[in-house]
Structures are given as C-alpha cells and as structure tokens.
Image: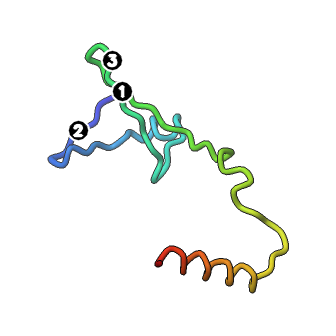
Amino acid sequence: MKSTVTSKFQTTIPKSIREKLKISVNDTLEWEIEDGNVRVYPVQADFLKFKNVIRVGKGDIRQDIERSRVLRAKKHQ
C-alpha cells in the first residue's frame, strides 16, 4: 500500500490500515528506524494510569473553592 508525502511532509494513513489498527483522530503514532526501515505503530492510551486521580462522590463546593483560592494565592506570592 502506498501514500504520498506532501510538501509539508504529511501523509494520509490509508483507510484499511486506520480501521485495522483502530487509529482515530488525535491518536499518537510512534516512529522507529531500524536497519534503514521505518516502523510506525499506534500508541495505546494507558487510561488506567489515571486511576484514583479524580475523586468522585459527594463533595463540599465551598471547601473546594476556598482550597483553590489558597493554592492560587500561594502560587502568586
């Protein structure tokens, strides 16, 4: 399968390749050069690395606002 490189050094990934590799808009590709050959593969988002980063459940908005104000004030000191 072929694709052309544009004057901006961009190329289009053929539809059959995008579908087979499940590549979508804003996905990241990894490029490697080995023995004069180029290897391109999709980087899978490891969403589990964000586990426990966002707290869920009932919260206290007033306390959150006050905490944000204190942190912002410290940042600008």
Point out residue 73 in the picture as x, y percentages from the top left corner.
54, 81
**Residue hosting label 2:** 4
Q: Name which residue lies at 66% across and 50% down.
A: 50
Most foreground residue, 1 or 73: 73
Amino acid type indicated by mark 3: Glu
Check if mark 1's residue and mark 3's residue have beta carbons within 8 Å: yes
Q: Name which residue lies at 42% across and 39% down.
A: 29
**Residue hosting label 3:** 34
Point out residue 69 in the picture as x, y percentages from the top left corner.
61, 82
Q: CA distance from mark 1 to mark 3?
A: 6 Å
Amino acid type indicated by mark 1: Glu
**Would residue 4 be found to the left or right of residue 26 on screen?**
left
Describe the element under mark 3 as helix, strand or loop.
strand
Most foreground residue, 42 or 49: 49
Q: CA distance from mark 3 to mark 2?
A: 21 Å
Point out residue 15 in the picture as x, y percentages from the top left corner.
43, 41
Quadrant occupied by the N terminus: top left
Describe the element under mark 2 as helix, strand or loop.
loop
